[in-house]
Every structure is written in structure tokens, then in C-alpha cells.
Image (cartoon, helix red, strand yellow):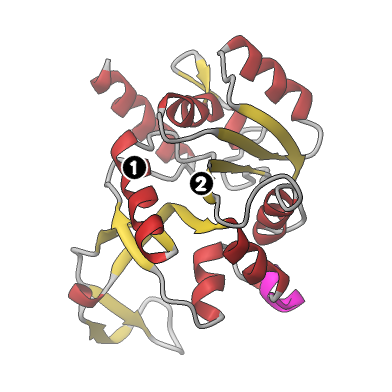
Amino acid sequence: MNIAIIKAGGIGSRMGAGVPKQFITVGGKPIIIYTLEAFQRHPGIDRIVVVCVKGWSDILKMYADNYGISKLVKIVEGGETSLKSIQNGVYSLRDEYDANDIVLIHDANRPLISEEIISDVLVECKLHGMAVAAIPCTDEIAVISANDPKCSTEFTDHKKLVRVQTPDAYRLGTILSILDNATEEQLRNIGATNVLAIAQGHEMHFANGSETNIRLTTQEDITHLEAMLKARS
């Protein structure tokens, strides 16, 4: 079984919208619904769990009902950090699913996730035990100076780098073990499960991401989303 955990526990303070960014309406639809619809449509996804910002669960349930998100089986309250939110979602599966089931973890504020990305992450996870969507780094990369963040005397080889996105995927037993072994410092300071996995010595495999799998953080990102949705329609 393949279970998608959609992380929607943040308030999006950098967006400055007055509501959590995943609930901002764009093109007549809340952002989180675009994300949920992508996993609802995918034939390889069996269940959806949302880790939701406190106080918004009833609104999310109403939206899910209105938009026919029938795979949504659980809404879990978010934690005080990104990883603690993910931990809440993963731990909610511990007694209900098999250790070999696959768990995909995806940001609610990446609404343009494609079927191809979901499929490739699933394939790589089944082959290697864990995987994350990523894209090549094509820009030149400068290392900022320790004394001046607007200065550099060093470049690094961008061909050795990738830009990591979501979803990332794991066998349920594996991600439970990773989170069980996480320190309090890691849970507070690391923002993603793939970073935590590597910090614990695991080998992360890359699936194909996409430049269109954008993460919405600022108002400028909303403008980009509106343009991309308009181009699609």
C-alpha cells in the first residue's frame, strides 16, 4: 500500500497573507486542493493523510468533501517544527499499516506536483528503500564569505549538486526507525526527512523532479503559480 502524507502544518509567515499559505485561494481553488487532487488522481496512491495547521482541520475536511478527495483517511494536527509535524503524521500510521508499505511525504505548498514525479519516486523507493525528487543544479554556485554574506571568494562545482524537492518516500518501517532515532536537536533544527535520513547515515536515491514542482513561499511565488495555471488552462 502507498500512503501520501501531505505536510500542511505551517502558517507561512513569509507569505504575509493572513491565512496559512496552503489555504490561499488561487484560480478559484485553495492551494492545498491542487496538491490533494494530484495524489487523488494518481492510481498508485491508496491513502492520503494530511498534517494540518492547528485550527484548520474542519475547513480542510469541508474542502476535501467539496472537491471529492475520497482518499483522505486522516487529518493529524501539526507539530511545532516541520519534522515534528511529519513525525505526527508518520506515527499515526504505526499501528494501522505494514512496515513494508510505502510512505510519500510531500509539501502542501507544492501544488503542481505531477503524476510522473509521484510515479518515479515510488519506483525508486521500491528499488532502493528510499527516494526523493530532485533536479540538476544548472546555475553556478558561489560560497558566501564567513565575514560578509554579500561576498565570495570561492565557487563550487554545480555539476555535483542537485536541488532537492518533495515528495520523498520510504518504507514505513524505515521512516519510523529514522524518526524514532532522531534527537530533539534534529527534530528542532532539520527541516526535512531526507536531510534527517542522510544525517543518520542512510543513502538517499534521487528520482526525477521538475522545475514546475515549485514551492510556494512568497507572494512572488503565487504570481508564478497563477501564470502556470493560466498556461495550463
Helix, strand, or loop for circle 1? helix
Which label was assigned to residue 59? none
Q: Nearer the viewer, residue 128 or 8?
A: 128
Q: Look at the numbered discs 1 and 2 and tell me whether their residues touch, using CB distance below 8 Å.
A: no
Query: Which stretch did the figure color magenta?
Result: 182-188
* Vertical order, 72 against 122 (above or below): above
Q: Is residue 120 magenta?
A: no
Residue under numbered circle 2: 106
Across and down, in percent, residue 23 comes to: 61, 28
Residue under numbered circle 1: 119
Q: As drawn, is 187 to the left or to the right of 126?
A: right
Q: Please tell me whether the stretch drawn in magenta is mainly helix, strand or loop.
A: helix
Crowd class of label 2 (few under 14; some 14 to 19; many from 20; radius 10 Å): many
Q: Residue furthest right?
A: 55
Residue 181, located in which quarter of the rendered image? bottom right
Q: Amino acid at mark 1?
A: Ser
